[in-house]
Image: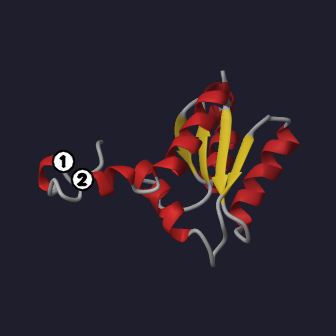
Amino acid sequence: MPRQILDHKNIHPAVQSTVADNHADIVAEVQLAISNNKVVIVGMAQNPAPKRARKVLDELGVEHAYLEYGNYFSLWRRRNALKMWSGWPSFPMIFVNGVLIGGSSDMRALIASGEFTALLK
């Protein structure tokens, strides 16, 4: 099911570059990490969920890249660009072989069902 996104024709030409370039560097950095790593966790400091996800992967011996952007008090605008890009509303954002699988609890559910192992292949 595709998610709703404002159609390009409904963005005035005077602001199109602002929309297109809004923190594009952070999105490009995450995209590069996703293309270079099987598993990527995008998180933020002070949030226990990314820490839990990393701990589970470490216990399973699954190599992963971790990108951290700010905390509850900083860089929220930059993190917002990632939320708008991915459509995922919270952190962590976990990607396996380029596919967003959700957050920490979503990953643990996939591990419990055995599907996580299949996604790694």
In this view, 75 is above or below 106: below
Q: Residue at x 73, y 52 (%)?
A: 53
Please indicate whether residue 6 sits to the left or right of residue 90 in the image: left
Q: Nearer the viewer, residue 14 or 41?
A: 14
The front one of 105 and 57 is 57
Residue that numbered label 1 is attached to: 8
Q: How many angstroms separate mark 2 from mark 1 (CA)?
A: 8 Å
Q: Which mark is residue 73?
A: none
Q: Is residue 62 left or right of residue 12?
A: right
Q: Could you tell me residue 91's position as x and y percent?
A: 59, 60
Q: Is residue 114 above or below residue 41?
A: above
In primary-sequence order, the first of circles 2 and 1 is 1
Question: Are circles 2 and 1 on residues that touch, CB within 8 Å?
Answer: yes
Residue 5 makes an appearance in the image: no
Looking at the image, which residue is at 33% across and 49% down?
20
Residue at 75% from the left image edge and 38% from the top image edge:
64
Q: Which residue is at 52% across, 48% downward?
A: 25
Q: At numbered mark 2, what does the secondary structure look like: helix, strand or loop?
A: helix
- The vertical placement of 69 against 7, above or below, is below
Give percent across and percent down for residue 57.
79, 43
Amino acid type of the residue tagged 2 in the rendering:
Gln
Which residue, given by chain and number where applicable, does mark 2 sit on?
A: 16
Quadrant containing the C terminus in the rendered view: top right
Residue 34 location (% of width, % of height): 60, 35
